Amino acid sequence: MHMKRYLSRLLALVLVAVIGLMGCSSNSSTTGLTGDYRQDTFALLQSLRTAIELPEDAPEKAAAQAEARGKINDFASRYRRDSSVATLSSFTTMRTALNSLAGHYSSYPNRPLPKKLKTRLEQEFQQVENALKRGS
């Protein structure tokens, strides 16, 4: 009788621990997003710049582009319906840049970014950073 009660308590403890641990794992561990729009935007900009600036023959180029695509999707999914950021100039400019980059990656996955697109993206990234510093 004691063994049965002990086992049922042990099982209950294990279930509580498993459920608790699963509840503690948030999306930020898989997406890299923190929920802080400003911080997430700066982190995304850094990741995108890394992917864009790597030489075409760099062995890590494909991985960096895949990571950038994933972060673009995560960022868009997290913030596109967030009314507190939807009207910010930093968000609308960022969304324009992300759409351009994602479009290139989708249409021309094996081609390098054209110089004209790189230049435009860097200008938009700078506008986003300036807007974030102003708080908009």
Image (tube, helix red, strand yellow):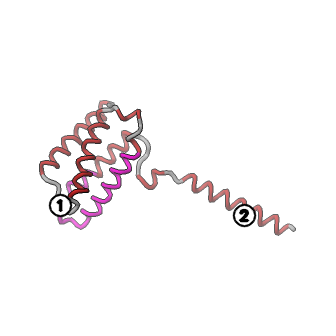
Report whether 14 appears left or right of 68.
Answer: right
Q: Position of residue 30 (x, y in %)?
A: 44, 55
Q: Position of residue 44 (x, y in %)?
A: 32, 48
Amino acid type, label 1: Arg
Q: CA distance from mark 2 to mark 1?
A: 55 Å
Q: Position of residue 17 (x, y in %)?
A: 65, 58
Q: Which residue is mark 1?
A: 111
* Residue at disc 1, secondary structure: loop
Q: Position of residue 31 (x, y in %)?
A: 41, 53
* Crowd rating for badge 2 (residues with CA inside 10 Å; few <14, some 14–19, many 20+): few
What segment carries the magenta color?
48-77
Q: Which residue is mark 2?
A: 11
- Residue 35 to residue 113: above or below: above
Name the foreground residue: 66 vs 46.
Answer: 66
* Number of marks drawn: 2
Going from N to C along the chain, the mark reached first, 2 or 1, is 2
Residue shown at 72% from the left, 63% from the top: 11
Amino acid type, label 2: Leu
Quadrant of the drawing holding the C terminus: top left
Residue shown at 29% from the left, 36% from the top: 90
The residue lying furthest to the right in this view is 1
Name the foreground residue: 110 vs 62.
Answer: 110
Residue shown at 87% from the left, 68% from the top: 1
Give me the disc on residue 3: none
Which image quadrant for residue 21? bottom right
Look at the magenta stretch and give its main secondary structure.
Answer: helix
- Residue 96 to residue 8: above or below: above
